[in-house]
Image (spheres, rainbow, N blue to C red):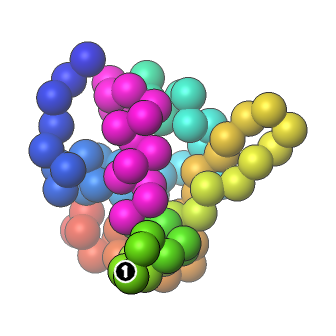
Amino acid sequence: MAVLKQDELAFALMAELANQAGAVSLARLSKRLQVRQSTLLRCIAYLGEQQLGQHQGAGWVSLQQDGERSLVVLTEEGRTVATQLTT
């Protein structure tokens, strides 16, 4: 597994999701980015829509459940940010 700093992982995650038309499974993202799912979930927590303690997440990604599968998708705001980051 690759060792990425949190900001590098966030950038890689945003870029990967920007290349997708819809939601991507957490397992697939974990394999593509070569990080553990737990590491990826921590990154998603900071980029996501939920509040973490006293801090509001960025609101750029959304984690959704589809039965047993966890799916990750960019929000509209996240897609705008990802486009700016990758151009």
Q: Quadrant of the N terminus?
A: top left
| Residue 55 highlighted magenta (yes or no) | no
The secondary structure type at the circle numbered 1 is: strand
| Residue drawn at x 16%, y 29% as measured from the top left | 3
Q: Is residue 79 visible?
A: no
| Residue 44 highlighted magenta (yes or no) | yes
Q: What amino acid is labelled 1 in the image?
A: His
- Is 4 displayed left or right of 68 in the figure? left
Q: Which of 83 and 78 is in front in this view?
A: 78
Determine which residue is flagged by label 1.
55
Q: Residue 55's x, y, as percent?
A: 37, 80
| Residue drawn at x 49%, y 67% as measured from the top left | 48
Q: Which of 53 and 69 is in front in this view?
A: 53
Looking at this rendering, what residue extends furthest in the top direction? 1
| Residue drawn at x 81%, y 44% as measured from the top left | 66
- Looking at the rendering, the stretch of residues picked out in magenta corresponds to 33-46
Q: In this view, does 80 lie above or below 22?
A: below
- Is 17 displayed left or right of 65 in the figure? left
Q: Residue 4's x, y, as percent?
A: 16, 37
* Magenta stretch, overall SS: helix
Q: Residue 27's x, y, as percent?
A: 56, 28
Q: Please rate how many residues cluster around mark 1, counting C-alpha atoms within 10 Å: few if below 14, some from 14 to 19, many from 20.
A: few
Q: Can residue 48 be seen in this view?
A: yes
The number of numbered badges drawn on the structure is 1
Q: Residue 80's x, y, as percent?
A: 42, 79
Looking at this rendering, what residue extends furthest in the front direction? 53
Q: In which quarter of the image is the C terminus?
A: bottom left
Q: Which of 44 and 75 is in front in this view?
A: 44
Q: Is residue 79 above or below residue 11?
A: below
